[in-house]
Amino acid sequence: MTAAGYAGYRKVIANTTESKEKILLMLYEGAITFVRIARRGIEEKNPKLKGENISKVLAILAELDCALDREKGGELAENLAALYSYLTNRLTTANIKNDPEALDEVGRLLRELYEGFKGAAVPAHAKNSESKMKEGVRIAI
């Protein structure tokens, strides 16, 4: 591999690694949005809107579960897998029974996970410098 090719490869790998946290947060944001839209589907008695969006949340949860590193993640990975399974069951209940409370619970838990991962994704140097940036801009990711 040429030096330029290797440098380009390393840059892509570094950028991909740095954006894993951002991708995770985007998945949670999407799931939260789709839960909200599914709830609107129940309120409007629109089974298509409800079903399509619950399916999107289920797909995101399946991907999050598949991405868990159960060997390195230990108890945390096991707990997340159990939570994703619980959320899947609650979404199934919401879909079958048109249960908005089940969707509210799923949304609340997803928001808690999102906030937790968002806090964990703040770079260490930003925590140490209390996120002081020029012009008062604060970057969490």
Image (cartoon, grey):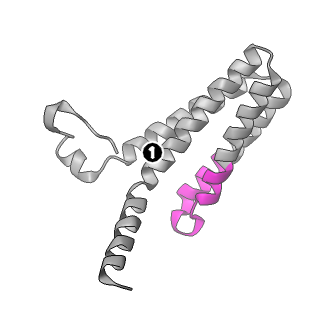
Name the residue: 74% across, 14% down: 43
Q: Position of residue 38 (x, y in %)?
A: 70, 26
Name the residue: 59% across, 64% down: 70
Q: Is residue 84 visible?
A: no
- Tell me where the magenta segment starts and ends, as one range: 62-83
Q: Determine whether, in the image, residue 94 is placed left or right of residue 34.
A: right
Looking at the rendered image, the quarter that the N terminus falls into is bottom left
* Residue at the outermost right position: 96
Task: Reply above or below: 112 against 43.
Answer: below
Residue at which label 1 appears: 117
Name the residue: 18% across, 31% down: 136
Q: Position of residue 78 (x, y in %)?
A: 61, 57
User: Could you say whether the residue bearing mark 1 is in a helix, strand or loop?
Assistant: helix
Q: Is residue 39 magenta?
A: no
Name the residue: 16% across, 45% down: 129
Label 1 amino acid? Phe
Looking at the rendered image, the quarter that the C terminus falls into is top left
Q: Is residue 63 visible?
A: yes
